[in-house]
Image: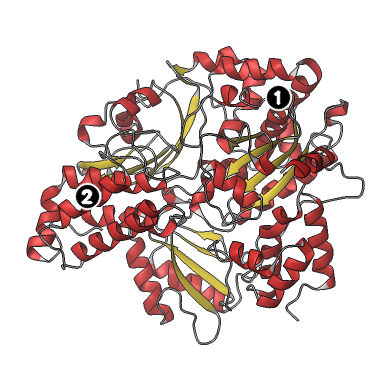
Amino acid sequence: MPRLTPDNVKIAEELVARYPRPKSALIPLLHLAQEQDGWITDEAMEHIAELLGVTPAEVLGTCSFYEMFKREPVGRYLVNVCTNISCLLLGGEELLEHAEERLGVKPGGTTPDGMFTLEDVECIAACTEAPCLQVNYRYFTNLTPEALDQLLDDLRAGRLEAEVPRHGILARVRQKVGPGRWAGTGIAAQAEVDKRI
Amino acid sequence: MAVTNAPKIITSRFDDPAAHTLRGYEASGGYQSLRRAVTAMTPEQVTAEVKTASLLGRGGAGFPAGVKWGFCPPGVFPRYLVVNGDESEPGTFKDRLLMERDPHQLIEGVVIAAYAVGAAQAFLYVRGEMALAQERLASALNEAYAAGYAGANVCGTDFSVDVVLHWGAGAYIVGEETALIESLEGNRGMPRLKPPYFPAAKGLYLQPTVVNNVETLSNLPWIVANGGQAFADLGEGASAGTRMFALSGHVNRPGVYEVELGKTTFRDLFEAPVYGAGIRGGRALKAFIPGGASAPWFFEEHVDLPLDKETVDKAGSMLGSGAIVVMDDTTDAVRACLRVVRFFARESCGKCTPCREGTTWLEKILERIVIGAGRPEDLDLLMDVCDNISPGIAWPPRQTTICPLGPSAVSPIASAVRRFPGEFEAYISRGTRAEVGVHA
């Protein structure tokens, strides 16, 4: 099952067509696979390799470099608490400790019900609203332990479904690639360059 | 003078909730500059205006944008424009706000730049963790294509450019331009050796490639509309125009403020009621980071320096990515130092030995100091490891690595150890936390 679905293959082909070289679409395709399954399976990586005409090892090589690609299942909600400098100064570490206590897991762990995975992450670029965290890459800022408790309760009860889609769904708007879309003049000339490399 | 009368150049629409839509953007004069550039100016004229403006790159290194464009070898096509929106420097988030709140301003800047350099395609590389920025840019691109501001025959002219929204997946090093190009080619984001080749000569697919930061390009619509000279008239000396600074940490009003370069001092930014409004609780300043986690720390004696590149560089640090982090006197310098170093250890890509091994050892040594297992020789050892990564521990740093990430890890250690040796020694001798307060 975790090969890309026919609908996603169609999206993948559109993505590949945007780039002068297919392998450039590798990271977007890995995101697509994670959007489909919530994590990156070996079968999805093999399928992506087929679609791009590269080896599965090349796909794995890229996949394993980037923090966001999860190569084992994670919770529905990935709770990323920032503890970098600006958050550290305003209680980020205490917030992380509170989250550990509340969820009963250490960073990297997933709650037994599969609802939450907790992570201690680097700066998520909301420093003026420290301490802050992201849930599935959506921001929650200026947090107190009480606000964190409320947030976790709301997530568990499904009260934030509209704001926070499940893990893997990143941007809910795609750039359209319509028929007749002009795709750069570089491709033919690039083929000439390729011959020389 | 704490607050100058400089116009807001890139944050003028930040309070308009509709600014991210095409209608909202056009209502405030949006896309007029692009129309003017592609219908009434040659690419050379656009480049000349940007050179006149002396717009320095806003990503961190501060290289003049117009000059960078000029490095593309003549007659070699296709060329590419890559927009660096992989903003991950701790303390920094101006680019995220520009992408979320005014995406059309960026797209207009991108298409103007693509016109100036003759790019066939522009790739907008957005940091993976910024979901809202990606959504806003995708919507804005769809609107811009439909309205003829991007894609085929921009504004009805012969000029066409394809703007592709691309997104990363969580790697700080990809903010380095050659690592960004590697990532855009589908590889692990590891920097390329430069020189001999810089991206302008051999970049994406080994073709001429201009890599510009989001904030840099967001200035272009204003520069085209008002002329490069008007931009150059703002600011001071080589630091022209305005810049966004993200002020965070122990201040009463943390926020992102667009200020005129060279005419505003750090003290103004910390104390003016419209900016930081003073240090939290009226406490004393202990240290501040003037340009993102990579920058050496500044202290009380530096607060009256103006915010301009030359002055800050001469004083031994940098404005870098425009992130200012304020630490009051309750801050534990050792733990703050450890946290910044841990960031570089985690984010080292592993390509160069001094950085891969050095940052990891720096973190381990600092960690044992903090948990009370420090050794008497640890301070010397820290400095020795720093010296192996960045010989001489000087500023600007010398490198034993391909990119500046390794030497960046040296900045907080050199700053904290030299300034607060007593705090480190207290940790080591007592094996407990130094008595400096309750905060990290």
Relative to B303, A196 lies left or right: right
Disc 2: CA contacts within 10 A as few (<14), some (14-19) or many (>=20) = some
Mark 1 vs mark 2, CA separation in Å: 47 Å
Q: Chain of mark 1?
A: B
Q: Quadrant of the C terminus of chain A?
A: top right
Outermost residue toward the right? Answer: A180
> Residue A182 at what x, y percent from top left?
86, 41
Amino acid identity at mark 2: Asp
Q: Nearer the viewer, residue B356 or B53?
A: B356
For mark 1, what is the residue? B116
Q: Would residue B11 be seen by someone viewing this image from the given angle? A: no
For mark 2, what is the residue? B384
Q: Quadrant of residue B69?
A: top right
Residue at the spot 27% in from the left edge and 36% down from the top edge:
B394
Q: Are marks 1 and 2 on the same chain?
A: yes
Q: Chain of mark 2?
A: B
Residue at the spot 27% in from the left edge and 26% down from the top edge:
B304
Q: Nearer the viewer, residue B352 or A60?
A: B352
> Residue B224 at what x, y percent from top left?
66, 20
Amino acid identity at mark 1: Ala
Residue at the spot 30% in from the left edge and 34% down from the top edge:
B395
Outermost residue toward the bottom? Answer: A112
- Mark found first going from the N terminus, 1 or 2: 1
> Residue A34 at what x, y percent from top left?
66, 69
Seen in the picture, residue A166 relative to B419 is either above or below; the reply is below
